[in-house]
Image (cartoon, helix red, strand yellow):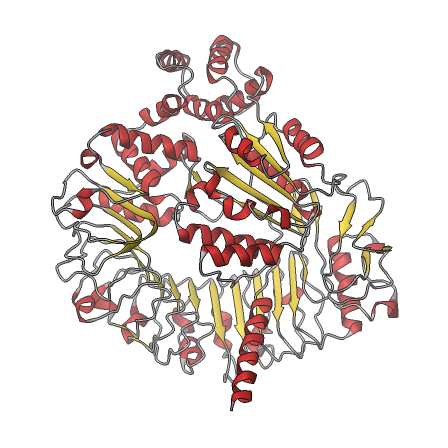
């Protein structure tokens, strides 16, 4: 019996390792930077050549410091994009100061570090102390590049730097900070190089300012003197130049003169006041929107922010959001989230603080990052408070009394444990409380105005009180990872206008009410990882649905049938994750999903015949198969000409992949052991032809390639500054067709003119043996 238990434990341990490795994803994405950069090349080259010195084998920290808004983060991003491929692994951790305020934030940084460098997507470290050991142990064998951006206090990065001596020789850590003293402190135990980012010179400032103010690098002669005065006033700070230039764009000369007069009445050295001038140019509604984003909504998707603000202001806010973007107060990221420079955000916080520097209950917004003030504990209340963030560094027991705050619109809570919650304000629009400690919402709470309900990892149950609630304005509901949820009730009565439903990893969820299949406004529905889910709506008449996730629902047998029988109603569907387990044949009606751009199918016995038809999925850009028995594919370059990403994960019987589509950017193959050598050689040659690589960089030498396997990825990156690709081949032997080989952990070689001259040495590390190193 004991032996049997030991075998079971070993099996579970191995299975966990297997899952971890199987979930690995290679990270080759370049960081996004502004298209128009001025005066940055010299800074970047100086840091790379003089401070980083990539060829040196020491472990080195490079600190980039300077004034707020001078471009430290931008320089760090450009450097990262230029040299990250010279290391075994790389990670850019942004906003370290902000994320280090709580235990969860520190753990998230550690997990991000392991994910970006090692690809361990599902790694959970559990606690800070455990995370330190996990992070260091998994990284110390790699030559790595790490950027810690926006560090304000030493304690934010102590968990990482105190083990700096354990990193492999040649590793580099870049820190951006406003505080040079922080870097001075690091010199006690580390090799630290300094780089101070200087302000732009007058010529550079002139180019940047004119580009923002006129849309070109020159200006009309009448504005010459005014341009020079504005440039002189900004003192070479890129962020200030961009803000002022954008503020003046399209304005008359008289308006320029008026604006300059206003600037001159503010102390030159006071950046806060300089930045606030753009804020003062907003109307009252726009100012309120800016402060709400700075205090509560930074990092939210743009559409979600607009829906929240619309419910408060009773009109569409897209124009006002655009105004904030035009004035460089906020930015929209590539994934459509709202963000802002941390200096701009701090300017907003300071505006709120100045409303009442001494009496916090007279402020419109409360931001509590160290402790909760008495006003949140005492049953006093204040009608002046519009929003509250309580984000404590550690979990703390306390009793919150918020019922009398009748004007409260935003409530964000982290690390607060309370045994009872008497009531919540009925005017709330955003209730964002991760790890909500109670099983039920307060009985007196009437969420008739709520737009967003986020309660991830909570103890909430969808009980009788929840069923009595009427969330008439609720649009976004995220109850993912809530283990106490067993049934989703009738949402057609509770929240008929819901757009996004997220029940990911609700592992005890068994049943979803039939009404959910009739929610006409539903756009996104996530049931992935609901292992015990058995009952879902039989009919899915969801005409607005764009995204649906039905993967990893092991107990769900009727889900796919319900989905396929409702294809005619899902004409808007763009993203589909589905399991074909126990599905004998995919119906031909699936080809009616003309808007589908992302399709992932699990447990396919064969490539569905219904998809092997002309004009099936004309907009498909990503196609994936996981845990499937498919042996080959049809001519996908003809069937899916717009395909950009094709991946196979543990398709054990896959033997052949035909010619890839012309626009393919990523091919990912893992765990496909039946892919024969002839197919591998042909595939490599085809990819080489597709991407226009030189002949000596593709498989073209016949039988000598049989000891190589294309197993992981080919990920070209057609960036503006050149061509980049990655080819990963597993195994412990170096193929004979590699042009350059040597014994050891590195190989030096001459590179082509069209390759970056920054890195002449490629490291290929295998901790298990000292095999020859090589390059293509």
The residue lying at 51 percent from left, 71 percent from top is: 591
312 on left or right of 622: left
Quarter-wise, where is residue 504 in the image? Answer: bottom left
Q: Would you identify the image quadrant in which residue 200 lies?
A: top right
Residue 127, given in percent of the width and then of the height, sits at 44, 58
Side (left or right) of 9 relative to 768? left
- Looking at the image, is 271 positioned above or below residue 63? above
Q: How many marks?
A: 0
Tell me: 181 left or right of 40: left
Give me the residue at 53% from left, 34% from top.
185
Pick whichever, 514 or 86, lies toward us: 86
**Image vertical order of residue 556 relative to residue 732, above or below:** below
Identify which residue, 612 or 425, lies in the foreground.
Answer: 425
Where on the picture, by quarter, is residue 433? bottom left
Relative height, residue 104 to residue 613 (above, below) = above
Q: Is residue 133 left or right of residue 490?
A: right
For residue 311, say whether it is visible.
Answer: yes
Residue at 81% x, 66% y: name it: 733
Give the farthest residue toward the bottom: 1
- The residue under the point 55% across, 62% down is 620
| Rendered location of residue 306, percent (x, y) | 32, 45
Regarding residue 314, the answer to whether it shows in the image is no
**Looking at this view, is 513 or 408 the one in front?**
408
Screen quadrant of the C terminus: bottom right
Q: Residue 93, how many percent across, how many down?
A: 52, 46
The x, y position of residue 574, in whole percent, is 47, 62
């Amino acid at each position: 019996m004991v032996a049997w238990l030991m075998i079971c434990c070993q099996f579970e341990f191995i299975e966990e390792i297997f899952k971890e490795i199987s979930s690995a994803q290679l990270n080759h994405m370049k960081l996004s930077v502004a298209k128009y950069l001025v005066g940055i090349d010299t800074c970047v080259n100086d840091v790379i050549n003089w401070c980083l010195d990539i060829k040196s084998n020491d472990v080195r920290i490079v600190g980039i410091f300077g004034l707020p808004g001078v471009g430290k983060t931008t320089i760090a991003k450009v450097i990262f994009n230029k040299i990250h491929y010279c290391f075994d692994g790389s990670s850019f951790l942004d906003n370290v100061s902000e994320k280090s305020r709580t235990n969860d934030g520190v753990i998230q940084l550690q997990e991000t570090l392991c994910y970006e460098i090692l690809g361990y997507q599902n790694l959970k470290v559990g606690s800070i102390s455990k995370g330190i050991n996990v992070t260091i142990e998994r990284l110390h064998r790699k030559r790595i590049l790490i950027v810690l951006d926006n560090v304000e206090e030493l304690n934010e990065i102590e968990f990482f730097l105190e083990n700096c001596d354990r990193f492999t020789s040649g590793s580099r850590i870049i820190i951006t900070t406003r505080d040079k003293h922080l870097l001075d402190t690091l010199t006690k135990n580390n090799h630290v190089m300094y780089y101070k980012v200087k302000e732009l010179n007058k010529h550079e400032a002139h180019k940047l300012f004119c580009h923002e103010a006129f849309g070109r690098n020159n200006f009309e002669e009448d504005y010459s003197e005014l341009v020079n005065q504005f440039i002189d006033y900004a003192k070479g700070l890129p962020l200030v130049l961009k803000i002022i230039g954008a503020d003046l764009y399209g304005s008359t000369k008289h308006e320029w003169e008026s604006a300059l007069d206003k600037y001159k009445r503010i102390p030159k050295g006071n950046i806060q006041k300089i930045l606030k001038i753009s804020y003062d140019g907003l109307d009252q509604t726009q100012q309120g929107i800016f402060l709400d984003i700075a205090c509560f909504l930074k990092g939210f998707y743009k559409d979600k922010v607009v829906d929240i603000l619309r419910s408060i202001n009773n009109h569409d806010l897209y124009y006002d959001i655009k105004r904030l973007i035009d004035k460089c107060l906020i930015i929209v990221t590539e994934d459509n989230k709202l963000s802002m420079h941390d200096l701009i955000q701090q300017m907003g916080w300071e505006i709120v603080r100045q409303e009442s520097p001494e009496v916090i209950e007279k402020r419109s917004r409360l931001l509590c990052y160290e402790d909760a003030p008495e006003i949140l504990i005492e049953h006093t209340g204040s009608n002046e408070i519009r929003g509250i963030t309580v984000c404590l560094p550690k979990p703390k027991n306390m009793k919150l009394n918020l019922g009398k705050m009748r004007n409260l619109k935003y409530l964000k809570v982290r690390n607060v444990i309370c045994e009872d919650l008497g009531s919540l304000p009925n005017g709330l629009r955003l209730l964002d409380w991760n790890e909500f400690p109670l099983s039920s919402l307060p009985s007196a709470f009437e969420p008739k105005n709520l737009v967003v309900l986020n309660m991830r990892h909570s103890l909430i149950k969808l009980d009788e009180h929840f069923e009595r609630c009427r969330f008439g304005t609720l649009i976004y509901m995220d109850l993912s990872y809530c283990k106490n949820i067993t049934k989703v009730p009738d949402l057609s009565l509770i929240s008929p206008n819901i757009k996004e439903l997220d029940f990911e990893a609700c592992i005890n969820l068994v049943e979803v009410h039939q009404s959910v299949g009739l929610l006409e406004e539903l756009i996104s529905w996530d049931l992935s990882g609901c292992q015990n889910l058995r009952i879902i709506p039989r009919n899915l008449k969801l005409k607005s649905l764009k995204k649906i996730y039905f993967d990893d629902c092991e107990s769900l047998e009727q889900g796919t049938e319900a989905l396929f029988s409702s294809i005619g109603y899902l004409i808007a569907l763009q993203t589909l994750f589905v399991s074909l387990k126990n599905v004998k044949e995919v119906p031909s009606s699936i080809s009616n999903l003309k808007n589908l751009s992302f399709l992932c199918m699990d447990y396919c016995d064969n490539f569905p015949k219904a998809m092997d038809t002309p004009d099936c999925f004309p907009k498909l850009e990503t196609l994936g198969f996981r845990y499937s028995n498919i042996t080959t594919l049809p001519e996908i370059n003809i069937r899916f000409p717009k395909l950009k990403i094709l991946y196979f994960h543990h398709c054990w019987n896959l033997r052949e992949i035909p010619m890839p589509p012309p626009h393919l950017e990523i091919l990912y193959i893992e765990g496909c052991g039946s892919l024969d050598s002839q197919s591998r050689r042909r595939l490599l040659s085809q990819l080489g032809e597709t991407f226009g690589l030189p002949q000596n960089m593709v498989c073209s030498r016949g039988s000598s390639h049989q000891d190589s396997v294309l197993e992981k990825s080919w990920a070209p990156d057609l960036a503006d500054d050149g061509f980049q690709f990655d080819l990963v081949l597993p195994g412990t032997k170096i193929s004979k067709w590699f042009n350059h080989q040597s014994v050891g952990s590195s190989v030096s070689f001459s590179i082509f003119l069209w390759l970056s001259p920054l890195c002449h040495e490629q490291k290929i590390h295998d901790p298990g043996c000292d095999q020859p190193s090589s390059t293509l």
